[in-house]
Image (cartoon, rainbow, N blue to C red):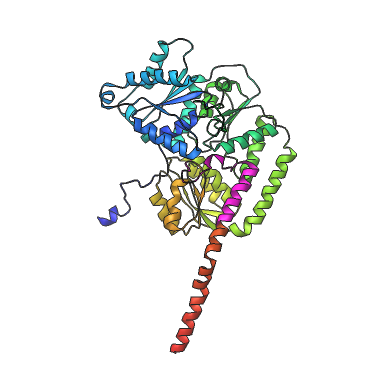
Amino acid sequence: MNDELKHCRNVNENPCNMCMPMGGILALKGIESSMVILHGSQGCSTYMRRHIAEHFNEPVDVASSSLNEKGTIYGGESNLKQAIDNVRKVYEPKLIGILNTCLAETIGEDVERIADSYSAQQDAASPLLVSAATPGYGGSHAEGYFFTLRRIVEQLAEPVERHSKVNIILPNLSPADIREIKRILQLLQVDYILYPDISDTLDRPFLPRYTKLAQGGTPLADIKAMSGSVATIQMGMTVEDKYSPGQYLADAFGVPLYNIPLPIGLKNTDLFLECLQQQAAAQRVPLELQQERGRLLDGMIDSHKYNFQKRSVIFGEPEIVYAVAKTCLENGLFPVVIATGSKTTRLDALLRSELAASPDECTILNETDFAAIRQTAKEAEAVIAIGHSDGRYLEERQGIPLIRLGFPIHDRVGGQRLLSVGYRGTAVFLDRITNTLLEKRQKNYRRSLYETFYQEATEERRGDQCD
């Protein structure tokens, strides 16, 4: 009986993901003049608002329909309509995203019908209402992010004339990364629609006058016109079709879809530029980007002697995990544990082919928590970890230094300024890894030498004296 239960565990200790509506909020923050309402209890919006504000170091407003015991039993339609009225008065948004939480989904609230009912009673100038069913138990924040993007496109995109723009659909990145992607697109003279765009809305400069809604985000007019683009380049190799906005545009409007990995690492960035040249009629790669590529190669050569054959742990959102794993393999930093809190079948299949040439065996964990990651990392003798702040216990309990990357980063400042994409970003990211390995070695090399050589020599002398 004990043998049968030995490998069973009925609890989830520090999950490696956050809930689905958290991702939905992040997606909506990248849309022009938009506001979010969580249809559920106030606690949900408070928790998510705090998490996002800590990562971006920005004020983050998330409204709530404040479902209580009465609304749970008799339905929350009146609460939700009152919340929409209040948001319109206070923020005057162009779009309101309504996200279902666990409570609203469990009692069977038909949010789409409520939104349609509300819109039918209003004038033509009322804001657009977009609903998405994102219960916490429906998936991780990564699925919530892409599903919300898909729902916005489903409800806004409309038939238009073909034009020369290309849709660039992004996963959850830092504002600094998005600005870098925009710079690359401008250097290549690509006419694009970037979706979503939090580069200004969640990293705005200090201004004398505070505005409730930040400037920036993907314009609503651009989202409506995504159906007429020449192609969609979606950085979503691991995204299931049912969550994919690019797949919807392909099915509904015939916009060709090209799924590529995040441009972190040399090969991934090369692939991004090649895809832009083939599908978006981009100009020849300019000298500025060629030099940045050369500098990255030089940096890889410089750091190779420190990184080669080191064992790494990589965890977080599937799209980031996949790109970082490829970058580590390029630099001889072999992954021994790759983990995500999402339930995805595509990540495992993609990684198996990449890991085939790695000399170290790698464990891939899906829907996992940090108890499992810590134990597996310890057994695999990992020396460095790459992921978000929730993995800090790897450092505290296992002594594995953590390179912070992804979302959330709530125990450091500057999460919004972390740059990792493109040739420039990869060089910065690689330096962070190498310097962390050097710091660890320099902190411990005297003790390591003492324990390896001095104590052995002392034991031998003692043995000789006894003889």
Magenta stretch contains residue 183: no
Taking the image as shown, residue 100 lies to the left or right of residue 446, namely: left
Where residue 147 appears, as percent x and y from the top left, is 46, 30
Where residue 280 appears, as percent x and y from the top left, is 66, 29
Residue most extreme to the right: 287
Where residue 60 appears, as percent x and y from the top left, is 46, 32
Could you tell me which residue is drawn at 36 percent across and 47 percent down? Answer: 13
Taking the image as shown, residue 354 lies to the left or right of residue 365, namely: right
Residue 114 vs 279, above or below: the answer is: above
Report the front residue among 357 and 61: 61
Q: Which residues are magenta?
A: 407-436
Image quarter (top left, top right, bottom left or bottom right) of the N terminus: bottom left
Report the front residue among 46 and 441: 46
Please say whether residue 309 is visible from this viewpoint: no
Magenta stretch contains residue 418: yes
Residue 446 vs 404, above or below: the answer is: below
Taking the image as shown, residue 68 lies to the left or right of residue 20, namely: left
Residue most extreme to the bottom: 467
Could you tell me which residue is drawn at 52 percent across and 40 percent down? Answer: 319
Residue 438 vs 151, above or below: the answer is: below
Asked where in the image residue 6 lies, by quadrant, the reply is bottom left
